[in-house]
Amino acid sequence: MAKPPVIHLLPMTPSYYANWLDHAIQSFADDKQRTHGYAPDQARKLANDSITGLLPDGPETKDQHLYMVQEETGTPIGHAWLAMKDDYGLRRGFIYEIEILDNFQGNGFGRATMQALEETARALGAEALGLHVFSFNQPAQNLYRSLGFDVTGLSMEKAL
């Protein structure tokens, strides 16, 4: 069995954040178009409003932790977003985004990043860790299940 890769979670720099924000909005818009059939301009507005609403102070927003993911050598391989919140007496972490660049996928970096996010959430006091995954993303669902995540709800939709 191959040795798991070593990754580092580093706080996003302002310049990285600016590039990431545009990418994250477009990526979320694309996913919304794919799953709900929104027109491109509607999907972009929805994605922009959702993400900027969660990050009113950008990378300085309280309880929002935005990371650049680097491999052991310092090569950037992706990014991740972990939010923390108190939910009726339970401290929860929520992974809003994890993305490993295409040319690094399939080498254990996603698993290593998820494990690092779990450790970070635990260090920040989380008693539970959640995330959302789109139904079409089977590789991610398989990874999350293998890490002990369970489905806690299921949204369904029918086009009319």
Image (tube, helix red, strand yellow):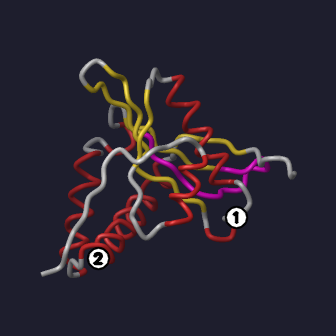
- Give how far across and how far down residue 102 sits, in percent: 62, 70
Q: Which residue is mark 2?
A: 33
Amino acid bearing label 1 = Gly
Q: Earlier in the sequence, mark 1 or mark 2?
A: 2
Q: Main secondary structure of the magenta part?
A: strand
Reply yes or no: does residue 75 show up in magenta: yes
- Residue 38 placement, left or right of 134: left
Residue drawn 85% across and 47% down? Answer: 3
- Give how far across and how far down residue 16 sits, in percent: 50, 55
Reply yes or no: does residue 10 show up in magenta: no
Q: Quadrant of the C terminus?
A: bottom left
Numbered disc 2: secondary structure: helix
- Residue 75 placement, left or right of 17: right
- Examine the rendered structure and indicate whether residue 16 appears above or below residue 25: above
- Residue 41 placement, left or right of 25: left
- Give how far across and how far down residue 127 sits, in percent: 44, 24
Q: Residues within 10 Å of mark 2 (few under 14, many from 20)?
A: some
| Residue sitting nearer the eye, 123 or 15 | 123
- Give how far across and how far down residue 140 sits, in percent: 53, 59
| Residue sitting nearer the eye, 42 or 156 | 156
- Examine the rendered structure and indicate whether residue 68 appears above or below residue 133: above
Label 1 and label 2: CA atoms lie apart by 26 Å
Numbered disc 1: secondary structure: loop
Residue drawn 52% across and 25% down? Answer: 122
Amino acid bearing label 2 = Gln
- Examine the rendered structure and indicate whether residue 115 appears above or below residue 101: above
Q: Which residues are magenta?
A: 70-82
Q: Which residue is mark 1?
A: 106
